[in-house]
Amino acid sequence: MSSSLPTTNLPLTLNGAAIALHDVSPTQTLLSYLRQHGYVGTKEGCGDGDCGACTVVMVGADATGQPQYQAVNSCLLPIGSLGGRHIYTVEGIANGHLHPVQQAMVDLGGSQCGYCTPGFIMSLFAGYYSDRVAAEVTVEGNLCRCTGYLPIRRAAQRVAAESHGDDGFSALLRQVPTQLEGTAYSAQGQQFYRPIQLAAVLELLAAHPDATLVAGATDLGLEMSWYRQHYPVMIALEAVAELQQLEQTDDVVTIGAAVPLSQIEERLRGVFPSLDEMLYWFAARQVRNRATLGGNLGTASPIGDLLPVLLALDATIHVASATGQREIAIADFFQGYRVTALRTGEVIVSITLPTTQPIAVAQRLSQSYKVGKRGTDDISIVAAAYRVDLDAQNRVVAARLAYGGVGATPVRAIAVEEWLVGQPWTWETVLAAKEQLRSAFTPMSDLRGSADYRQRLIANLLEKFFVEFAPSEQGERVG
Ligand SMILES: Cc1cc2nc3c(=O)[nH]c(=O)nc-3n(C[C@H](O)[C@H](O)[C@H](O)COP(=O)(O)OP(=O)(O)OC[C@H]3O[C@@H](n4cnc5c(N)ncnc54)[C@H](O)[C@@H]3O)c2cc1C
Ligand code: FES
Ligand code: FES
């Protein structure tokens, strides 16, 4: 039982061999452990999830619940979360001869200095056993500074064409259970619990009120990797059944707080265009394989990209504590810079998003936009998520204009939303709304962009939204 006293051994399988960790700090990163123990093929580049040099592969569940190899950044993975996991590093995939993905990189000249190569290899390895990951997306989270991407992309294309390899690694996927067991591990004065039921989480929180919750660790992992942050008690949420649900009924979608974003991306594709779009631009594959919606809300960063989307979609946050459960409307969730409405002892269990629309609505327009210094794997300068409901006369019935990167919290332009109601959804209306948006917020200047630039983005993104959905000259809608 995960809520029982922690043990001093943590069993896991590394490159096919069962091992038990002992006296290894649960908050040490897997990358640091690997390199200390001779697995130096796994490289450290940035140490914060940006470069992919440290990529290893872990068996996890795919969107259908089947076991799947998943590329993850070992620099962000705390040791404590690895109990019972199957992990592969670049040392573990050549079985007497090069693995086909290694051979592809050799044949197509995908490596020059070689520093990034193990990371690319492991991302390609995960892609090789998946029929759902397109070639380019497989390596989107890996950076190379010297080879140039063309040979690597060619190798990725060959791997995508050859995937579904039937070998010992695919046989393993047929044997490994995806349901993790509960673990409780203690070392070096730190305790790390990974319960499998919400009741156990709440029990642990009652016993350890100062415990730190951790889901995918793509935010907290930085604290461990860069700052060697010491957490006396951590409670991992990744194996908790109630937080792993993802359901769709006639009028609502329920997303468990600990469902990895890559699963949301796959299973909800087409349901909410603004969510699809923002997930596409969210970090890269390795991060999305671990990051969660609960973690994005828990961090409550003003530049948390999914938060404007949740604001625009009128999400409801369902939380639980030892004293009961309650719902928090997303509009009431953000209370200040990284301050939320969560009370001590509360856990986010799920997020619900309504899918129905009022009867007066003839058309719902919905989209999101992220502006950063580069396309993928970058922090937003401004993010926007819009939802505009129109009646049969093309008048605005309801509007949601939500932004990130414009203040201390993710925020809606409520005054402009209210002004829009009843207006015709025309170019003139949008130009007038733009004028109001220019002074709706007081964003700051920083190294990513000036306040003036942000103010222009806040207004211009609404125009982009209008143009994308405006009727074309042929009378059809564009976008
Ligand atoms: C390389 C890189 C790129 C990134 N790119 C983006 C990006 O494009 N857009 C973006 O928005 N973010 C980005 N992030 C940040 C991060 O991935 C997200 O904030 C992510 O959603 C965090 O989820 P997690 O499960 O990893 O959270 P964790 O790190 O596990 O937790 C984060 C916080 O939330 C709390 N928490 C987690 N789950 C719960 C819960 N169920 N109930 C209550 N509290 C909870 C934790 O206690 C902690 O305080 C990036 C991070 C990295 C390393
Ligand atoms: S070292 Fe760069 S992503 Fe881990
Ligand atoms: S081969 Fe040198 S960084 Fe990629």
Image (cartoon, rainbow, N blue to C red):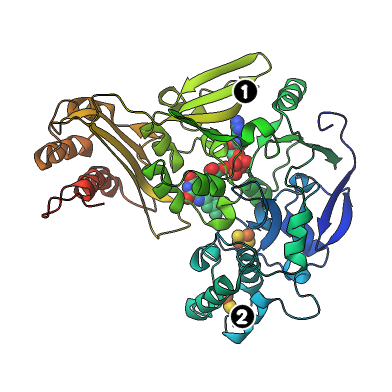
Could you tell me if residue 40 is visible in this image? no
In the rendered image, which quarter contains the N terminus? top right
Give amino acid for label 1: Glu
Sequence-wise first label, 1 or 2:
2
| Numbered disc total | 2
Give amino acid for label 2: Ala
Could you tell me if residue 16 is visible in this image? yes
The image quarter in which residue 295 lies: top right
Q: Along the horizontal axis of the image, is 155 left or right of 388?
A: right
Q: In the image, what residue occupies the spot 46% across and 48% down?
A: 279
- In the figure, 62 relative to 182: above or below? below
- Residue 429, horizontal then vertical, whole percent: 12, 36
Q: Along the horizontal axis of the image, is 8 left or right of 465?
A: right
Q: Could you say which is closer to the camera, residue 31 or residue 237? A: 237
Q: Along the horizontal axis of the image, is 457 left or right of 190?
A: left
Instruction: Determine the residue located farthest toward the top in the rendered image.
Output: 323
**Residue under pointer 1:** 346
- Residue 35, horizontal then vertical, whole percent: 77, 64
Q: In the image, what residue occupies the spot 62% across and 23% down?
A: 346
Q: Could you say which is closer to the camera, residue 120 or residue 453? A: 120
* Cα separation between marks 1 and 2: 49 Å
The image quarter in which residue 393 lies: top left
Is label 1's Cβ within 8 Å of ligand 1? yes
- Residue 401, horizontal then vertical, whole percent: 29, 35
Label placed on residue 104: 2
Question: Tag 1's secondary structure?
Answer: loop
Q: Along the horizontal axis of the image, is 24 left or right of 76?
A: right
